[in-house]
Every structure is written in C-alpha cells, then in structure tokens.
C-alpha cells in the first residue's frame, strides 16, 4: 500500500519524467532532421560532380574533334603542296615548333 507521501513524490517526479521524455523525443526528431539535411547536401554535391564530369567529357570530345579537323586540314594542305613552315607554328599548341633563321 502506498502512503500519501509516496503518492506526492510520484506526482512531483512525474512532471520531471514527462519533461525528460519530451526532450528525448525532440532530440531524436532533431537528429533525424540533421541527418536528412546532411544527406540532402551530399546528394546536391554528387549532382554537381556529375554535371562537372559531363561538362568535362563534352569539352574533351570537342577538343578531340577540333584536333581531328585541324589534322585533316593540314593533311589536305600537304596534299595540295601549300603547307608552309608557318602553318606548323600554332600558338594554341603546346610544344610547337619555332623556326629561327640567322
């Protein structure tokens, strides 16, 4: 059997227990929202990386096509006999030839 003092203690502590339970519930909700925000940020970063990768691939393909066209144009000029030494000097090509005559 419970005494009246025991019942009063239980009633006083029930308020504190209820608060603790509310805080625990809110903490799990906050953790869930934080985790969801992190996942959303990671997804956004991955989408940006994919976009950058796709753009890089397009640029690489475009550069290959431009080189192919230049090589074809040079081959045509060589066949026609109009290829000069100046045509070999290209500012946009790394490691181009420099013709120095003294």
Image: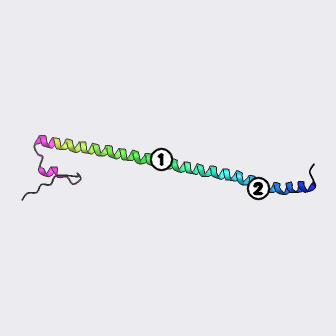
Query: For residue 62, what is the image quadrant?
Result: top left
Q: Is residue 15 above or below residue 47?
A: below
Q: Nearer the viewer, residue 66 or 14?
A: 14
Magenta span: predominant SS is loop
Q: Position of residue 33 (x, y in %)?
A: 62, 51
Q: Earlier in the sequence, mark 1 or mark 2?
A: 2
Q: Residue furthest bottom?
A: 102
- The number of discs equals 2
SS for callout 2: helix
Which one is nearer the viewer's eye here, 68 or 36? 36
- Residue pointed to by mark 1: 46
Give residue 50's position: percent from left, percent from top: 44, 45
Q: Which mark is residue 19?
A: 2
Image check: 33 left or right of 71? Answer: right
* Residue at x-position 43% and y-position 47%: 51
Residue at the left extreme of this rendering: 102
Identify the mark at residue 3; answer none if there is no mark: none
Question: For residue 77: magenta?
Answer: yes
Mark 1 neighbour density, 10 Å: few (under 14) some (14–19) many (20 or more): few
87 vs 41, left or right, is left
Which range is magenta? 76-102
Query: Would residue 42 be found to the left or right of residue 92 on screen?
Result: right
């Amino acid at each position: 059997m419970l005494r009246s003092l025991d019942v009063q203690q239980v009633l006083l502590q029930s308020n504190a227990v209820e608060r603790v339970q509310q805080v625990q519930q809110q903490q799990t909700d906050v953790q869930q929202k934080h985790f969801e925000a992190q996942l959303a940020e990671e997804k956004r970063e991955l989408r940006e990386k994919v976009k950058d990768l796709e753009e890089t691939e397009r640029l690489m393909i475009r550069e290959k096509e431009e080189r192919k066209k230049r090589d074809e144009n040079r081959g045509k000029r060589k066949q026609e006999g109009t290829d000069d030494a100046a045509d070999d000097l290209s500012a946009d090509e790394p490691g181009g030839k420099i013709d120095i005559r003294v």
